[in-house]
Image (tube, rainbow, N blue to C red):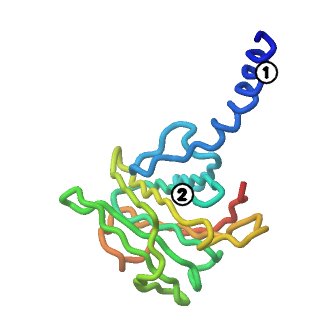
């Protein structure tokens, strides 16, 4: 009996770290401390990511009250699937999925996220996404190129960015 209890305790202790690692971010428009597995900072922009076996969770927080965007699948606008959003003057989220074409982009309807949420607080705008991993990551792929941008004040999808950049995230 004591041996069975001891074995159960050992198995439970071994499983605990696995349970902690498998928690997924909550897509609610806010980024909590330690909510995401990875983060990247660049000139006031914060990018967060967590990869699970079937999902990608992303967040971008940028200075200002205008639009924010993150695009996947390319380190330039051309070819990237771009997720853009802003909080309008009535406090409602405005969201669009767009495809980069050379130095512009236009709406598409074939690449919808599982979930999206936004917030505007303390002079910053945050967009959170839950995506199907298979839509952006091939088996064996270890990195994912992405672009990100924002406009500090514009509340539309056409005004040019004040800041843009690209990077590569490690798929963990």
User: In terms of sequence position, does the residue under pointer 1 or pointer 2 come before the other?
Assistant: 1
Q: Residue at x 33, y 51 (%)?
A: 120
Q: Is residue 93 left or right of 137 when viewed as pictured?
A: left
Q: Quadrant of the C terminus?
A: bottom right
| Residue ID for mark 1 | 7
Quadrant of the image occupied by residue 95: bottom left
**Callout 1: 10 Å neighbours few (<14), some, many (20+)?**
few
Image spot of residue 105 (x, y percent): 46, 84
| Residue ID for mark 2 | 58
List the single residue furthest toward the left: 90
Q: Residue at x 30, y 68 (%)?
A: 155
List the single residue furthest toward the top: 2
Q: Is residue 57 left or right of 154 when viewed as pictured?
A: right
Q: Is residue 93 above or below residue 22?
A: below
Residue 89: assigned label: none
Q: Residue at x 81, y 14 (%)?
A: 3
Q: Quadrant of the N terminus?
A: top right
Image spot of residue 166 (x, y percent): 63, 68
Q: Is residue 138 left or right of 136 when viewed as pictured?
A: right
Q: Is residue 106 above or below residue 164?
A: below
Observer-nearest of 64 and 110: 110
List the single residue furthest toward the right: 3
Q: Residue at x 58, y 60 (%)?
A: 56
């Amino acid at each position: 009996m004591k041996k069975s209890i001891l074995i159960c305790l050992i198995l439970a202790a071994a499983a605990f770290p696995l349970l902690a690692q498998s928690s997924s971010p909550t897509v609610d428009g806010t980024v909590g401390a330690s909510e995401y597995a990875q983060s990247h900072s660049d000139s006031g922009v914060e990018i967060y990511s967590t990869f699970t076996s079937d999902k990608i969770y992303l967040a971008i927080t940028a200075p200002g009250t205008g639009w924010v965007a993150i695009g996947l699948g390319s380190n330039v606008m051309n070819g990237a699937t771009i997720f853009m959003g802003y909080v309008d003057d009535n406090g409602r989220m405005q969201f669009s999925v767009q495809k980069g074409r050379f130095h512009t982009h236009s709406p598409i309807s074939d690449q919808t996220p599982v979930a999206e949420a936004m917030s505007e607080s303390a002079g910053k705008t945050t967009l959170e996404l839950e995506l199907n991993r298979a839509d952006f990551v091939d088996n064996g792929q270890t990195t994912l190129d992405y672009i990100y941008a924002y406009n500090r004040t514009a509340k539309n999808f056409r005004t040019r960015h004040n800041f843009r950049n690209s990077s590569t995230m490690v798929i963990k």
